[in-house]
Image (cartoon, coloured by chain):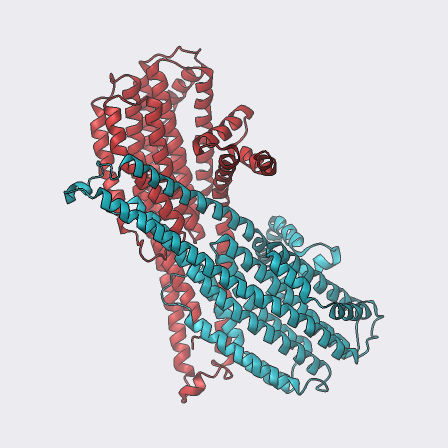
Chain colours: A red, B cyan
Amino acid sequence: MKSGLSFLIAARRCEINDLEQLTRTSALVNVVGRLVHALQKERGISNVFLSSRGARFAGQLPAQVKECRQVEAELRASFDHLDTDAGHLSNGARLFSRIAFVLHELDALPDLRQRIADQAVAAADATAAFVKLITGLLAVVFEAADSATNPEISRLLVAMFNFMQGKEFAGQERAFGAASFASGQTDSQSQQQWLHLIQQQERCVQVFSDFSTPALRERWQNSQAAATLAELERLRRIACSAAAGALDPNLSQSWFDCCTRRIDAMKTVEDQLAADLLLLCDQKIAQARAELQNHQMILAALTSQTAPAGGAERLNPAVMPYGPHLDRSILELVQDQASRLQVMSDELETARASLNERKIVERAKGLLMAHRKLSEEEAYKMLRQTAMSQNRRLTDVAEAVLAMADYLAAGTP
Amino acid sequence: MKSGLSFLIAARRCEINDLEQLTRTSALVNVVGRLVHALQKERGISNVFLSSRGARFAGQLPAQVKECRQVEAELRASFDHLDTDAGHLSNGARLFSRIAFVLHELDALPDLRQRIADQAVAAADATAAFVKLITGLLAVVFEAADSATNPEISRLLVAMFNFMQGKEFAGQERAFGAASFASGQTDSQSQQQWLHLIQQQERCVQVFSDFSTPALRERWQNSQAAATLAELERLRRIACSAAAGALDPNLSQSWFDCCTRRIDAMKTVEDQLAADLLLLCDQKIAQARAELQNHQMILAALTSQTAPAGGAERLNPAVMPYGPHLDRSILELVQDQASRLQVMSDELETARASLNERKIVERAKGLLMAHRKLSEEEAYKMLRQTAMSQNRRLTDVAEAVLAMADYLAAGTP
């Protein structure tokens, strides 16, 4: 019959198993981040190439595609290494379903690239296809962050997800701006969209900052070269305060280079975050293993001290298995563990609160899709435009939509 | 290289695995419920026995102890069947840690029983020891409810946990009332405590009702025999409106019998709930298996239709693996699965909201323990007495304590 102590040890083993799984997920997140980075660059280059009708970046495109393919192969290998047969992965159903979507989109990439090379696709449509794939990749990171059972690791994963999301908004701004400059045109609607992309970046970086370590925050501050920022803000000002249709196409290259310097600098912060994450996982595993060993030693000591002569008597629960002194120390172990898990669960809830904001937006989108018969993209656009026109946060608009759920449902036949 | 479809199938397998685990947990919850029921009766009998200085229930005690031991052996066997070695159980760390506590308390039970038989323990202390063990057993049910990943099963587990908790308050009322009647004494403080136990029962039954099925609600209504309820309310009125020190000890037996009839009737509802839970798990597993088979058939059909002659080409991601028509149907499968998982996750969050209330109380308790150097019992007593004296819900008081966290922390050296 299993003793209380053996369940204490089993609880520790579960924790170690969860941590080891987090290490694998963190490694996966790292590769996802690198593919996102490469795709963001390909998206930007493709955008300038298409918007300039093939006049710009024709030479840079093949090299970037090659880089993307290499990282894609790495990611596919990482996916292959995931233990899909066991079915034991916590949050596995959601993670695997996100991966299925990513693989589907990756399979469609060669065809998209052919159409870009042939200039047989509009810049906006090419961007939309890349955005869809990158959104899918970020959803994989989101599920990884949502599955973490250790609060400190969860905090870093939340910081990571928000930083990657912020970097993606920076990438969208680069593509959007590059296309705007290259086309030589702008209007008040696209200026508003541009400003919204800036706001979304700032919001994500704020969450990253809240959940990050002081060292990472400092690294983020230092990564932002003053000259790059000044140039970025100057070009933003020119584009967002220009009269309709009055952009200088020659600024496209400066804009792209300046954004790229900034995004590449963001990538170094992301790399540091990824390294910190793996280090933290290792530390937590080492710590949990040391504590497990400690428990096992106590168990061994107790069993040897209390083993009675008769085997049958040992199985009789009526016999107090340990002396009153040892019994007390076991109770302390049990209570320590329970309250430690309680504290962890509380901290975890705090870390996940920011992920819930995203879930609220997803839910509002789902509601609009169901009751207004919209596509996912249309639903998101509707939410975003409401946020933009009312100058409110996306989450607030999503919450308002959810609060109106009954009214929306009542309107359908 | 694994395809998107193979990850879709892996996601399904994870769901099935989660459901099978829920079946095992639900079976465990069933045995826990039976042990709680038996222990509640032993607690009540012990209480009358001790309060009447051995005059009452001396004959009934050994039979009840025997019954408890049988169910305890069953529960220990269930614990032994849990797969503690794999470390794969989701929420395993928390569940196993709760079980470790339960086993520790079960080991101490024979000693307590000896002291009860010897009348070497006060009725209140014996009750407190039983309450502690039963609270530990209910914490196991709580973790089971908290680990459910299927919203419908989660709803039933939430209903189950609250019903068991409500039944435990009914059991505490039986023990408390039996001791009060047997002692022939009451005062305004114990009357207030009595009324609070009634309120707590009603609150739990309300949550059970909210999360239950119509059939179960009806069964609950029908289980409450009018005659028993009338007798219960009559005795409650006598006890709670009596002047201090003026209870008829002869009513102890009627009170105990009347409460027992009611609690036994509650047990039939709980049994139905447990049976419904297992049935629901089976249905969900059958459904998930059918859908998995469906996916596998589609995968087989697709692979046979699209297998190219050259093996190498098949691995080249540049080749669109399926025709545009089939490709579209795969995308629909992927999107269906993703949105289904999203809906499940939203519903799950709703079901778990009621469990969060309990977590708030636990957190407030932890805060008081840390900053006021109180034991767990003292912290809970402090919260409960504030709730009683201010006539507020326990959760509201707990939330107020958490809101004051900074002030509490500032007061410590």
Q: Quadrant of residue A406?
A: top right
Q: Residue at x 54, y 53 (%)?
A: B352
Q: Residue at x 53, y 66 (%)?
A: B275
Total count of labels? 0
Quarter of the image with the C terminus of chain B is bottom right
Residue B168 screen position, x and y as percent: 63, 68
Q: Quadrant of residue A132?
A: top left
Of residue B278 and residue B402, the one placed in the foreground of this image is: B278
Question: Is B94 placed left or right of B390 in the picture?
Answer: left
Q: Quadrant of residue A225?
A: top left
Q: Is residue B239 above or below residue B344?
A: below
Question: Is B145 placed left or right of B54 in the picture?
Answer: left
Question: Is B15 placed left or right of B139 in the picture?
Answer: left
Of residue B83 and residue A210, the one placed in the foreground of this image is: B83
Residue B302 shows up from this direction: yes
Q: Is residue B274 above or below residue B305?
A: below
Residue B137 screen position, x and y as percent: 55, 68
Q: Is residue A325 above or below residue A173?
A: below
Q: Residue at x 62, y 71 (%)?
A: B131
Residue A309 screen position, x and y as percent: 40, 89
Of residue A393 and residue B331, the one placed in the foreground of this image is: B331
Residue occupying the far bottom of the picture: A310
